[in-house]
Amino acid sequence: MKVVTFGEIMLRLEPEGYFRFVQVDKMTSTFGGGEANVAVSLANYGLDAYYVTKLPKHEIGQAAINSLRRFGVNTEYIVRGGERVGIYYNERGASQRGSKCIYDRAHSSIAEAKPEDFNWTEIFKDCKWFHLTGITPALGGNMVQICIEACKAAKAAGATVSCDLNYRGKLWTREQAREAMTEICKYVDVCISNEEDAKDVFGIEAENTDITGGKLNKDGYKSVAKQLADKFGFQKVAITLRTSINANRNNWAALLYDGKDYCFSKEYEMYIVDRVGGGDSFGGGLIYSLLNGKSTQDAVEFAVAASCLKHTIEGDYNMVSVDEVEKLAAGNGSGRIQR
Amino acid sequence: MKVVTFGEIMLRLEPEGYFRFVQVDKMTSTFGGGEANVAVSLANYGLDAYYVTKLPKHEIGQAAINSLRRFGVNTEYIVRGGERVGIYYNERGASQRGSKCIYDRAHSSIAEAKPEDFNWTEIFKDCKWFHLTGITPALGGNMVQICIEACKAAKAAGATVSCDLNYRGKLWTREQAREAMTEICKYVDVCISNEEDAKDVFGIEAENTDITGGKLNKDGYKSVAKQLADKFGFQKVAITLRTSINANRNNWAALLYDGKDYCFSKEYEMYIVDRVGGGDSFGGGLIYSLLNGKSTQDAVEFAVAASCLKHTIEGDYNMVSVDEVEKLAAGNGSGRIQR
Amino acid sequence: MKVVTFGEIMLRLEPEGYFRFVQVDKMTSTFGGGEANVAVSLANYGLDAYYVTKLPKHEIGQAAINSLRRFGVNTEYIVRGGERVGIYYNERGASQRGSKCIYDRAHSSIAEAKPEDFNWTEIFKDCKWFHLTGITPALGGNMVQICIEACKAAKAAGATVSCDLNYRGKLWTREQAREAMTEICKYVDVCISNEEDAKDVFGIEAENTDITGGKLNKDGYKSVAKQLADKFGFQKVAITLRTSINANRNNWAALLYDGKDYCFSKEYEMYIVDRVGGGDSFGGGLIYSLLNGKSTQDAVEFAVAASCLKHTIEGDYNMVSVDEVEKLAAGNGSGRIQR
Amino acid sequence: MKVVTFGEIMLRLEPEGYFRFVQVDKMTSTFGGGEANVAVSLANYGLDAYYVTKLPKHEIGQAAINSLRRFGVNTEYIVRGGERVGIYYNERGASQRGSKCIYDRAHSSIAEAKPEDFNWTEIFKDCKWFHLTGITPALGGNMVQICIEACKAAKAAGATVSCDLNYRGKLWTREQAREAMTEICKYVDVCISNEEDAKDVFGIEAENTDITGGKLNKDGYKSVAKQLADKFGFQKVAITLRTSINANRNNWAALLYDGKDYCFSKEYEMYIVDRVGGGDSFGGGLIYSLLNGKSTQDAVEFAVAASCLKHTIEGDYNMVSVDEVEKLAAGNGSGRIQR
Amino acid sequence: MKVVTFGEIMLRLEPEGYFRFVQVDKMTSTFGGGEANVAVSLANYGLDAYYVTKLPKHEIGQAAINSLRRFGVNTEYIVRGGERVGIYYNERGASQRGSKCIYDRAHSSIAEAKPEDFNWTEIFKDCKWFHLTGITPALGGNMVQICIEACKAAKAAGATVSCDLNYRGKLWTREQAREAMTEICKYVDVCISNEEDAKDVFGIEAENTDITGGKLNKDGYKSVAKQLADKFGFQKVAITLRTSINANRNNWAALLYDGKDYCFSKEYEMYIVDRVGGGDSFGGGLIYSLLNGKSTQDAVEFAVAASCLKHTIEGDYNMVSVDEVEKLAAGNGSGRIQR
Amino acid sequence: MKVVTFGEIMLRLEPEGYFRFVQVDKMTSTFGGGEANVAVSLANYGLDAYYVTKLPKHEIGQAAINSLRRFGVNTEYIVRGGERVGIYYNERGASQRGSKCIYDRAHSSIAEAKPEDFNWTEIFKDCKWFHLTGITPALGGNMVQICIEACKAAKAAGATVSCDLNYRGKLWTREQAREAMTEICKYVDVCISNEEDAKDVFGIEAENTDITGGKLNKDGYKSVAKQLADKFGFQKVAITLRTSINANRNNWAALLYDGKDYCFSKEYEMYIVDRVGGGDSFGGGLIYSLLNGKSTQDAVEFAVAASCLKHTIEGDYNMVSVDEVEKLAAGNGSGRIQR
């Protein structure tokens, strides 16, 4: 089953363990990015996942491709050219000290891509699902236009389109985001958001919710989901629910609304290994679930279990199998040794 | 005080930190195995601990021996020969993701050992205690026969015999285990088990217990201990009690039954560094305690404190001193810095 | 704003992660020490922090200097000479196993320094604050005399003097400490202590307190602070309040008494990355706060937030900015990712 | 251009740097094997390289596949099943101390494969070249038969067949090798050998040659090449010429005989980073050259330059591009920085 | 003695050992750059070395500053602002495989600096020497203008000006270089070049020289030096002479022409640890020598010995003392252990 | 066969690779020392090697013991007590930059040992050989006296005594060395020296020799050997012959004089991995050879081959087997891979 995701893949430079940037002279150098992370999730679930981006011809660009191939992502549509691989520096937080992310992604090959770089007709041939996020159009240059063209082509090819709003205030303003995402969402079938993104991008708010702590406000989340669905006619809206106790401990759950039912997943109390890519792994789990015809409740349980496991895994990519996710979704979260 | 343990020592290959197998190109390469772990514990407590096994003549076999010598285990009875050192690949779990263990131990030198490889009479000369586990006979080939011969010789030499049931479903069936362990247990004075092993090996069950969570069911554990003791005439039966909250947090306690009293240890809430060898370190603590004439209550407190500390230490081996264990058993578990 | 701290800087040798000393053949080799840690804190807050000590002329001495320069500490008053850099071996604890510290600091250059090594008049020119701890006079040799001379010179130059009692039983006896610290405290304006140090050094005790666990005994701490202030005429007394749940989890708060008000900070529940230097980072935060005219309540909140963050950072030094501390003091301790 | 190679891929466990096996508790864990190494070379040169083998279903088997995918090898024909991934332990030599290799490859999935595991008709569809080595039939079990079937199917599909004699005395006897290779060589078009293999496998010898040192004996090599070609009707015979000065310094050249001309490459004096896979990288270079219609002289120059570069690269795989090889073959071996 | 250097400092990302870019997921992350390297050399020789550049306000910019402070460089004139720290990826070569350098330095803070960012009058107050290289004006934007302003201000302040031509074809064309450097060289007293740079930048050539190998062509180098001196009226011209045998072995010498005498240094045969910064360390040695009144012969011997030692040291910076350089210049190059 | 060596074992702290002391924040922490190195050599050759020293009771002392036990050295005579483990910091040289060694060994437990710490009668029971070096008496305190007592006891027990002069100018003066070694040599049967030590300790010189380079001066070495033998009545005198080309390349040979014949070994050209312990490994090889009755020529060949291999091995200890040494002594130094 062919699925396509589109966006940037960046070099992730990170001090090991809990060291701060200014303390180290060695960093892990892996690759990741919202949409690439979804592609790896889908490849790990056995789908024919294609990633579309633009990367320089040099070895750092090649290393990004290799990181995708290694985990089974098809990279044949990746365009080579441009000047640089985008970078993000990440410093892992602990306890009361949050993780810190420094972007160095301006002027990357994908941010400076041109519409004619991508042959969307060929890319979406036989494609069942297309996923992008709000980060891709935020990259600047021609990316809003390119994203819209991609969405149109995906719809024309009969693919379902999903989008994670993923607002990044360091990349564009709320106004820019609202204008672009309003256009893109016309083509979207499945929308993924959290409470903050819904507010930042579309000004959609629920009452009585405190994102830095506290208990889930179920009615508020339902309200956000319904407002989103009503505004754009989404078939499904997923709202992820993160409660940050501290940098080592988060609670995690989600709501999936299918136009009729509001299905809340169970909530997981997580000891975090790597927080980055947590939302993307939800998206990957959700796409897999819906492509495989799971019910709304089962789909949200699979997606949340998948992203719960992601928080225990190093790097952007969620390295889990369908079997592992289903075991957790079915209730085995005791972390016992398997031997 | 001479003590002998017998079994396999394996190469343990493990990604560092919380990386998954498919993410790494470097692994820690240490050694361990249920009975070897007990030998190191006992050497660390100052006993004359001998380890008996069979290892190839090449350098990997030698490295296994060196890992034992380094911590004071006497390796003079180790037989050299055969083809390979058994391996287990271990992947550390976190939060809801359990640890994963892949065995590659078939065809190891010890699994293909012959009865004539071991001169039990010499081995048990002046020996006070012999320890083995249910893993050793499960290795296949002649190992059931060899274990029985060893037990007989140990008894003949006047040694106390202890056995940890340690059922491994990947190595043999419940039926094979029951047949072999029924024979071996005839020679056993001190039996160590947990609730699952008692059920898997001998079908002995307590009521109302949920091993994946929940509170201790004290009466159930007493029942298991008594059934085991009654069935084989064990002098003492120890039941370890693990509650797995998640892969990072376990509670840990034990019951020791001496035919008269049922002594429960205090329960520890543990932040886990390395879960492997947790049960073995209990065995090591128990043997030391009983060899040194501790009371039933003191013995179980020492054994549980020893294994609580093991969970904070990297590798299979429990690297703690009698002094450290006794301090914890006496109540100092606040983890304050010692300077 | 020129501030001066004085003491030893040691090489810190430490197994990585949670390995024990006897398991490793590689150690991190960083530098630290109570007063040096305060100097780095102050440099990170933007003050002109000078560190005064004595170090050998060889490259290990130079590496110690470089570790200070790297983080902006002025090292121009450091005297070169003598035989060795003091060392402390540190083993990180986990859960019920406490950290272990082995000193190898006798005969260091600073421990064998002579009064004429230091030109205090020049050192304290234009200096606003002088900080030392009870470790420095405990180093032996001429250090009590040298500390007293330094204090006198600092007062003569118009600097405020702060002292952290920091009793180290491995370096001197309670009697030696009491005699020396009684003399030094005559020159001290701001005293930092915890409950144990107050008792060990001056025999000052509060009632009803259990340092290894339990709840804060507010009246007891007030009593200790007042007794200290009354005895020596300190302008301010800070009492740090640590509750050690286990080696991975501590609660942390403080009291600051200004002769009139007793201001307790909020209490933080911490997941510990590196416990060493926790108290020093409190001192650094307090000095910065008081030099910048913060109120008693704000000062203690800043100092506790600073040291809370220190517990999440590798190494002796507290690598945080004023901005980061103030955000936490203002209430954002959820550890959310910053991107 | 589709090319197929067939054989074992093993886990390579190796101490870092120049440490000996008994000194380490960490090893690099990469993958490699004669035929897999050729596949990676060919993928790096831009060919559609397929690797055929059998690997267990578990994560270690998956990691082997990922190592191939990462560098662009197509793994779709790899069969999953069996018990274990073969292992070789490798210790890097230096100066007078040679590298040491310990095999632990018996009972691997491929060694226990069955003829029906492989659908050769499908595998060789549209295939232009098939490469195997003398290691594959030496694995035991059904492998001789399977190799012969593969060769037949390759020829039937119109592919050119190349074989590197690669005699491994630890896997089979000279007699076994001669019998099997005599049969296999009936289907071989291009034979790769060194002087020792020609002698060990077929008893073919040249006069006056000393393999442990000294100068090239050109006439002797020509004689070996001609005897091999005459015996089996090979279209081309390549003889690699290694002079081992010590473990850090080797000289390296080759002869390619096309039935008419004897073309010797230039000789390289190499500082060795990783010696393993040196011969395989020659094979990869030769196949690429011949598939691209290079002249006999150009082909041997390309193949030798490719393998010269391999000796400077860590791991089994030769990570070089056509462009890099051609630059060296054209004469730029000064190792100047490229910036 | 105050000396100032001006240019870019970059993050250097490099695979460890001899791994290629596409093989690693960890890289060393140090800092360096032609002029920064000279500053560190001079600080290590005991001069008051100031480095001038522009760096972002974030932690990666701070880490660059810390790397300079650590080794004693004064960073007070470094301007904070702009978007990014320039990066160069470096892959270490071996034997016939040359090192590979990928620049990702466009849009760095210094490349986008404005003339008003630098207060040259203040910077050159009491300054004795100003050093820059041909890389700095090549960065684009306003950098040619800024360099000229800096040179003028340095001359006005009475400083000697040195410049290493350092042509980088990836940053600008020969024509751009010639135009800018012709202007800059008007202010230069001491010119450093190699044969290639003299040709690339000014079209100045000697006859009969082969840069990729072979013997020194002394007359040719003299000719280049004299042509350079005559064209711009340099007081001194230094020509570095590198013979690249392979990536592990280079020969290294230099010529210093003082308008009267042509002094050739002795030639060193080097086993290379890190080739980067080799030329910069020559510049550092030369500036130190000339500032300290060494004779032309002694100056070139010191500079060449300094850079010979640099080739044995990891990273861009030359970590050697005056004493170490002088010992080598005096003839002790046997590399015997010092204990 | 019981052999005893006596001296200090130190913690060796060393930057990895070719980093300088001031560049790192991690060091390898292994153990070694002249006499301990000999003990490990002998254990590796299968002898019952006992090491005698004094070490503190803490874990760093224990780690030193473990490093010996790991490689089979019997540690039962090691005395526990005193304050510290001696340390040496070692920085690896390259090319023209020599290794640098900083001692921090004063006040170690062994340096402050008392004569009554050692029960020499028990230690030398059934002992065949006793080895010490000139470093041990140089440690100060009572060590000269203790060494003399040890030698007397060894002779009384019938052991052969060997001594490596090993002059260390950082530990004592030539005069102190001469006085002490003159006394100790009265008990020595086999003396090991190099040309410099013979001169430094006893003023014995040969003519026409340049130790920093050049060719072997055979007559000179014979003269030194004969003078030493004549002066003290040694049965055998070995002179090691090192030619240091640079820090990466040394030539290595030796002369053994048995009172009648002067046997020179072949000379090896070595690429050095770790130079430390090179001389000690010669001593180990020589003792093994002589204990096993090898001829004078064979003995010196074995000893030189053993130490040639040591130079390829990380750490102080020579990790080679009798078989490996004999293969090299027999002429196989081509460093070919063994598989």
Image (spheres, coloured by chain):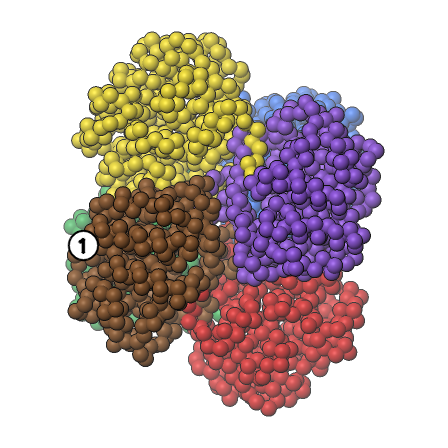
Chain colours: A brown, B green, C red, D yellow, E purple, F blue
| Above or below F318: residue F119 | below
Question: F312 or A162, which lies in front?
Answer: A162
Q: Residue at horizontal 56%, vertical 40%?
A: E170
Asked whether, in this view, residue C255 is left or right of residue D164, the answer is: right
Q: Where residue D207 sits: x, y (%)? A: 45, 9
Figure quadrant of residue E324: top right
| Above or below C274: residue F39 | above
Mark 1, Cα crowd under 10 Å, few <14 / some 14-19 / many 20+, is: few
Asked whether, in this view, residue B273 is left or right of residue B234, the answer is: right
| Above or below A126: residue C191 | below
Asked whether, in this view, residue A131 is left or right of residue F269, the answer is: left
Mark yes or no: residue C22 visible: yes
Q: Where residue A275 sits: x, y (%)? A: 38, 61
Mark yes or no: residue F23 visible: no
Asked whether, in this view, residue F254 is left or right of residue D314, the answer is: right
Q: Where residue C135 sits: x, y (%)? A: 64, 70
Q: Which residue is mark 1?
A: A292
Q: Where residue E87 sits: x, y (%)? A: 54, 49
Q: Residue at horizontal 32%, vertical 41%?
A: A76
Q: Amino acid at mark 1?
A: Asn
The subunit letter for the residue under badge 1 reads A
| Above or below D179: residue D39 | below
Q: Quadrant of the N terminus of chain B?
A: bottom left
Question: E34 or F144, which lies in front?
Answer: E34
Q: Residue at horizontal 51%, vertical 64%?
A: C313
Most distant residue in the bottom direction? C260
Figure quadrant of residue E221: top right
